[in-house]
Image (cartoon, rainbow, N blue to C red):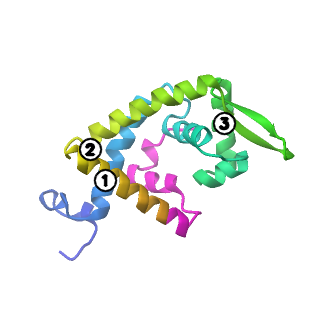
Amino acid sequence: MSTTDPCELPADRRHGSSFGWALGMVLRRWHEYVEEALKDLPHGSRGYHILAVVVHEEVPTQGALATRLVIDRSVLTYVIDDLEAAGLIERQLDPRDRRARRIVATERGRQALAEAERRVAHVEDRVLGGLPEGQRSAFRDFAGRAAEAIHAAAPGTDPCAAVTSVLGRSEQSPR
């Protein structure tokens, strides 16, 4: 058999047979567990990532947030609408450019993020539970470095497309 697609390999040869397969397995499990852990947060993991950037980074405008997270601006608008309706964020006029809106976390949003971060950390420990703690930490560090390098080299790379290709469109939550 000359195939390089691990899904075409016999089941007994798939385990550990490719880097892509391994990443797909980790991503699938992470996504399943995180969506369950964040089901009370508008848009689950997508809402979580938006809230995390708003709280932890200096992202000046809604447009900059879309660029940072590589989310289509029209999709971002719907998610922000729902986060705002839940009282987790606010749109504020940018004092430097009144045409632009800054996305700012409310106190309730900061508290919700702290709780969500605690749950996500628990999920990540569960997903990586087969590794000793030092290796879990190293895995997170290396994966983060690789992701930042990819994003820096190709800022338009859409992380949602990667999730969709691994999980399939049918498993993605609708807007």
The answer to whether 158 is drawn above or below residue 53 in the figure is: below
Circles 3, 2 touching at the beta carbon (< 8 Å): no
Give the x, y percent position of residue 90.
Answer: 71, 31
Residue that numbered label 3 is attached to: 80
> Residue drawn at (69%, 49%), measured in percent from left and top?
73
Indicate the position of residue 175 as horizontal and vertical percent values. 58, 38
Instruction: Identify the main secondary structure in magenta.
Output: helix
The CA distance from mark 1 to mark 2 is 9 Å
The residue where tag 1 is placed is: 139
Amino acid residing under circle 3: Ile
Tell whether position 21 is magenta. no
Q: x, y (%) of residue 113?
A: 52, 30
Disc 1 marks which amino acid? Phe
Q: Are marks 1 and 2 in contact (CB under 8 Å)?
A: yes
The magenta-colored residue range is 150-175
Amino acid type at circle 2 is Leu
